[in-house]
Image: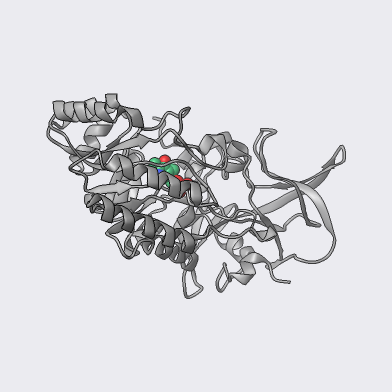
Amino acid sequence: MDSYTQKMNFFGNTDPEELVTKYGSPLFVYNEDILRRQMRRVAGLLPNHRFTSNFSIKTNSNLSILKIAYEEGLNADAMSPGEIYALKKAGFPSERIFYVSNNVSEDEMQYAIDEGVIVSVDSLSQLEMFGRLNRGGKLSVRINPGVGAGHHDKVVTAGKKTKFGVAAQDIEKIRDVAAKYDLHIIGLNQHIGSLFMDYKPFLEACRNFLHYAEEFDELEFLDFGGGFGTPYHKLADEQEFDIETFKKELDALLTEWKKTSGRDVLFKTEPGRYIVAEGGVLLGKVHSVKENYGHKYVGTDIGMNVLMRPELYDSWHDVEIYREGKPVTEGEREVYSVVGNICESGDIVAKDRELPVTHEHDVVCILDAGAYGFSMSSNYNNRLRPAEVLIHSDGSDSLIRRRETLEDLMRCFDI
Ligand SMILES: *Cc1c(COP(=O)(O)O)cnc(C)c1O
């Protein structure tokens, strides 16, 4: 029986055991073909319209992956000056970057303005700030339509109880502030939440969003946001986000809108996870297997500093076990919690999972770790952030970010 990663030939010419021997453990491994496949799917979302897809780089800001996104024709969303900086380093020109700002300082806003990046403001007070800094400038405003969607409260990013965007009922006020500073509102954006597998609420949000567009005369673009889901339960045959049907329905909606409103703008989306989650896995090593009061634990080097999602959102990641380079898919199974090496009881990557009987030195492969994986990792417990490796289309592998060293931990101290 093949494992998922084997079926996908995820590791190319090598196997996970060789990879961790060569590059160390834990290790983020990306598959270039899968990344490009996902990028092409989003880039080709609306062939009948003026359209660009942005890649939300908070999901994965590895420079090599950003360069691939650039090659595939994606634009990019930045959420901070650091992300703008990284995008520039990866070769993105300003006009292909969109800064979705949230509660930023004047310095940060000024940085984006100086870099020539279009900014989206997130409140009336930040609209005022933009006006003071850049009278007569062009910008986008993030609208909070009052409804959201997502897999967990923490990732619902629109709705009456979230901090994001300008409430739709304040559209009149947006126009007043813009007039006060001679601002040109050339874009409207929204992002209702993250990880929905059913496109219908998103499509409804797009339909609703189009009405706001009609309130602004100078609009050049409309950005519908991201959030397209990833099947994290793929080993239980969870189906992919149905991008083909979504594509047809969105196309029909926009065609109809252009006809009835007489408007034509550039449409944008800004997915992140959908683009990179499945193209990345996280490898780690089993250092101990034990039983405490009837519960079995697989103790690994995959701490919550390396993969934050299970701790932060109770997220599910499928797990595969490799032994001597081969996936263990047959034989006896046991229920284990796969845990890390951090001094926190919440340091659990996968809770109560039925897995093959696992031994020390086995390699644990955490699936769908390409989004919000490395980018959320930290040095908690003074652990080193892992290396990242890319498996190329020809099956070869290369290091795309070196592992941190103990010296890196001292970088900011004057000693
Ligand atoms: C996080 C975020 C995205 C991307 O969300 P995904 O669920 O990863 O697609 C897009 N736009 C904004 C404004 C975001 O904050």
Image point (49%, 65%), residue name:
34
The C terminus lies in quadrant: top left
Q: Quadrant of the N terminus?
A: bottom right
Residue 110, given in percent of the width and then of the height, sits at 22, 33
The quarter of the rendering in which ligand 1 is drawn is top left
The color scheme shown is one colour
Counting from the top left corner in percent of width and height, residue 276 is at 48, 56
Residue 208 visible (yes or no): yes
**Quarter of the view holding residue 234:** bottom right
The mark tally for this picture is 0
Indicate left or right for 171 with 27 as reference.
left
Q: Is residue 231 above or below residue 349?
A: below
Horizontal side, residue 384 vs residue 132: left or right: right
Q: What is the residue that sits farthest to the front in this orientation? A: 260
Residue 10: % across, % down: 57, 67
Is residue 404 in view?
Answer: no
Residue occupying image coordinates x 50% and y 50%: 200
Return the x and y of residue 85 as percentages of the image width and height.
30, 45
Most foreground residue, 16 or 350: 350
Q: Is residue 33 above or below residue 410?
A: below
What residue is shown at x 14% (from left), y 25% (from top)? 180
